[in-house]
Amino acid sequence: MTVGGHIPFLSLQQEHVETGVQDDIDTALLRVSRSGRYLLGPELEAFEAEYAAYCENSHCVAVGSGLDALTLTLRAMGIREGDEVIVPSHTCIASWLAVSAAGARPVPVEPQSGGFLLDPERLQAGITRRTRAIMPVHLYGHPVDLDAVEAVAADHGLPVIEDAAQAHGARYREKRIGARYAAAFSFYPSKNLGALSDGGAVVTSDAELAHRIRLLRNYASPETCTRGMQGVNSRLDELQAAVLRAKLPHLDRWNARRREIALRYHQGLSDIPAVQTPTAEGWAEPVWHQYVIRSAQRDRLRNALAAAGVETLVHYPVAVHRMGVYKARSCQCVLPLAEGLAAEVLSLPIGPHVNDDTIDAVMRAVRKAAEEL
Ligand SMILES: *Cc1c(COP(=O)(O)O)cnc(C)c1O
């Protein structure tokens, strides 16, 4: 697990070997390599059916990345220039980039105070007559309160598009994320369900929407082009579809292990005054894509952990509205909660293959570093 006392934040190679899936991945790759079919073939079709079923929904369209899954869904919903889409201020920049790529303007809403996720109570304030959609992000694998989002969306007749790039398998009130609205997933290698390259998918119950995304991902047909639908090249290839099919049957087990680790961290760290551990609502079944603590002295804590051989990451160090392109363009806005999170969040190592000894070693290092802050 650890090499010379060093605990890596992530090791996909170890993950694949230690969770016992490496041989299945290799077999899948060889099968496709020898099949002569590399795009839009039987592996893609089978994966789409299997992933839709996993998400308890009827349609899945797999594309080239999570960003494309979001962008093409927004475009297929008819979002375009001059429109506004509500997004959380604390998220991965890709959530915002998708809105921009569709030609629309991201309008940020602050997180719940003390939490990480978009605050449904603040949605109303972001809505204008140009608002065309609401995009909750199930950040770190924690479901957003979708009933509360729905209350506002229904009031204004707005569609909801979920950024589920970190939430494969999570549940909101017993139902899978992806079962309810159009949800966009990423299969970036480090996600809870990851390919060996880029990949993404949209899951929806809306057959018309799925059809339009299917056209868009493959240039769009001549007929739809003349109707003004400009397609792209964004197809999940057969190799990646086959790898994802090999991994999908293990996902629930892997997510269960992530939950065990989160519980262990919680029990071992929540009494330390200098750090705040994350909590989950009773109606949420998170999948702990990241285990994110907060500390007012995050950078010092992070440096001390690095010196002790524990690698950590920050998701995300700069609030999106403060990043170059958006700082210049959109908001002069002040979003103190998102900016506060950017300064305080720290992601600890987590993964389906990580054993208790490693988690305990991380916790000892956090306790020691926190005491010496
Ligand atoms: C990873 C991620 C994306 C983008 O997915 P890619 O496959 O990298 O394009 C979008 N939103 C969130 C919240 C993500 O974590």
Image (tube, rainbow, N blue to C red):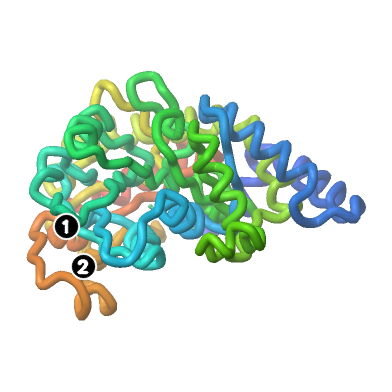
Give yes or no for contact between labels 2 and 1 (Cβ–Cβ under 8 Å).
yes
Q: Residue furthest top?
A: 174
**Horizontal side of residue 269 vs 129, given as left or right:** right
Residue 57 in view of the camera: yes
- Residue picked out by circle 1: 338
Q: CA distance from mark 2 to mark 1?
A: 9 Å
Q: Position of residue 187 (x, y in %)?
A: 55, 50
User: Looking at the picture, which amino acid does disc 2 mark?
Assistant: His
Residue count near mark 1 (Cα–Cα under 10 Å), binned few <14, some 14–19, many ≥20: many
Residue count near mark 2 (Cα–Cα under 10 Å), binned few <14, some 14–19, many ≥20: many
- Observer-nearest of 75 and 248: 75
- Which numbered tag is attached to residue 321? 2
- Which numbered tag is attached to residue 152? none
Q: Residue at x 40, y 27 (%)?
A: 171
- The answer to which of marks 2 and 1 sits earlier in the sequence is 2
- Observer-nearest of 341 and 334: 334
Q: Position of residue 151 (x, y in %)?
A: 19, 30
- Observer-nearest of 111 and 226: 226
User: Looking at the picture, which amino acid does disc 1 mark?
Assistant: Ala
Residue 117: which quarter of the image?
top left
**Horizontal side of residue 319 vs 34, given as left or right:** left
Q: Position of residue 124 (x, y in %)?
A: 11, 44
- Observer-nearest of 327 and 329: 329
